[in-house]
Amino acid sequence: MAPLTDSKQQERLLCGMIDLYDNQMLTDVILTAEGKDIACHRSVLAASSPYFRAMFTNNVMETTADRVELQYIDIDSLQAIVDYMYRGSIDIDEGCVQNIFTTASLFEMVPLCELCAVFMTGELCVVNCVGIYQFSSFHHSEMLKTASKNYVVEYFGELVQTSSDLLELSFADLAEVISDNNLNVSAEEVVYEMVIKWIEYDLTDRRRYLSQLFRLIRFVLIPESYTSDVVCSNELVASDKFCMAHLSMVKLFRLTKDGATEESEEGFDTDFDLNTYPRLGMYNAKMMVFTGGSQDRHTRALTCYDPKTRKNYYAIPLHVSFDFKYRIDYHRTVVTGDNKIYLIGGIFYEDHHFETAGPALNEVKMFDPYRNQWVDCAPLLRQRCAHAVAHDNGAIFVTGGKAVYPGGEAMSSVERYDITTDRWHYVSDMPVRLCHHVAQVHRSQILVLGGMIEETEATNIFLRYDISHDSWQMIDNRMRVPRAEFGVTILNDELYVIGGCNGGLKISSVEILNLATERWRFGPDFPEDRKSMVAVTYEDCVIVCGGIRTLISRMSRMPRVVETRDMWKFDPALGVWSREAKLVQYANTHACVVAEMNTKRLHESEYVSR
């Protein structure tokens, strides 16, 4: 006899139980918490929770009781969980998630605990990561603990400076964090100072952990002068025999070997039992970061160049050099004070090269350096390319540009982006319409210079935007040379304006504005007439990379436009320009910032710039 299956029966059964629950029919047990009651069905509780199954099937007092009082459980969490048992859905927010997790853990409801853990993982930030790490450690949630610990490890350097939460960690949790090779600190001294602060926070109870934590500090990575001047002079360290013996071992290691550079494969010296492996954060380097088009319309490239080592890197590769399908032009990039990189607007090459009025983009993306991917942010309120961007105190400002290109009218509108809320809104318009201009922040004011008013007419306009008063001021003290598509940067309280174009003519002149005296002067000319270069400040020098120049063919004597990717440096102390590299492999002429990047997370090119 073949069984007949009714696929709808389970759904009818569930709907029937929900209806009985909602209408308080045939309920056979009352759960009580904080003096309030919830009437429900034993069978549903037992089917959903091993805790209640054991309670109602093991011949204990609650097995047949009409009322079960639950201690140390808040009624809101209990109500939410009982509703979840019937309906399979639950409303969770930051305020209730830990209480719900705790109660679900008591009830042994693993799937609900996992839902809460996933939610908390998605809410991790610098403010709550330490608290969530402690919570997950206490409740033995391995998935949540791994995620929160990794977050603490990644932001350890920032947490040490901005938060006291690390001082609340247990010994075991702190030891686990500072043992991690991926600890994001640029200097091991940060780890030592954190350990001392943690012990001094509760000296009576924590002093006994000093020697155990001391072994986890990689003193071989700390300068010998710091060890002798700071560490050895600390009273806690000086009075601990193990600590002093450990420091003697470090000193002996330095005398007998070349130090941390001669590490074993695992990062431990077998003779001295010293961990010499560098932390992940010690691979951070200040680099020039370029952005552009990549392999499709939705991804963006991020590439890097280290002027010190002359090495080239990429996190996300550029579009294929001979294929302009996904190339993006006239976009802008900005880096915030906490090293977040944003790419804003632009236009695809094909949309402006083959069209007279191609649509610009309103896309905004933030780079996630831990996953090596761009994260979509709230889009601009208007499509923009050939605009200018600036950052100040948690806000990004976007000025002018064009919504269609190359045709279309330049805009005067200005948008402000609140990084915390991920929202854009308009602020006061500029007094004029501009594109291909520049913007720099100085003392919480945005300086806007140059650009194009008409399609071919460059200007020497100088505007100042007062952020606090949302007001624009036209400055009479202008650049002497009207220009657009030029490089700009600030070094030692002086603003450098470099190259650019006016109509069809490219410019080599350099103008320097002393921001204290508000006086302009000409600087040494850039070695070539060039436009669309990027300029940044790096190690007390002005760096210029890439750009578009005009060459004369030796054969035909005809001019041809060439996009270059070389790099030049101007040292104010020497007063001269010098070419530092003939080719920066992954350079981009439209967007470059200086940011901290970790070489361990990047792909290194075999090509070294010369």
Image (cartoon, rainbow, N blue to C red):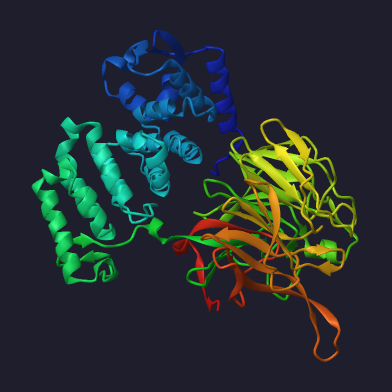
Asked if residue 147 can be seen in this view, the reply is no
Say left or right for 52 vs 341.
left
- In-front residue for pair 329/428: 428
Residue at 45%, 13% in the rendered image: 38
* Residue 528 x, y percent position in the rendering: 72, 73
Compared to residue 184, the image places residue 114 above or below, namely above
Is 77 or 27 nearer to us in this picture?
77
Q: Residue at x 26, y 62 (%)?
A: 276
Give the residue displayed 33% in from the left and 14% down from the top.
64
Instruction: Give the quarter of the image for residue 74.
Output: top left
Image location (x, y in percent) of residue 500: 76, 63
Task: Say which of 121 and 506 sits in front.
Answer: 506
The percent position of residue 143, horizontal first and vertical second, equals 40, 44
As drawn, 116 above or below 591: above
Q: Splitting the image into 4 quarters, where does residue 148 fall?
A: top left
In screen coordinates, is 593 left or right of 219? Answer: right
* Residue farthest to the bottom, as pictured: 555
- Is residue 390 something that shows in the picture? yes
Residue 394: image location, x then y, percent: 59, 39
| Front residue of this view, candidates 266 and 261 | 261
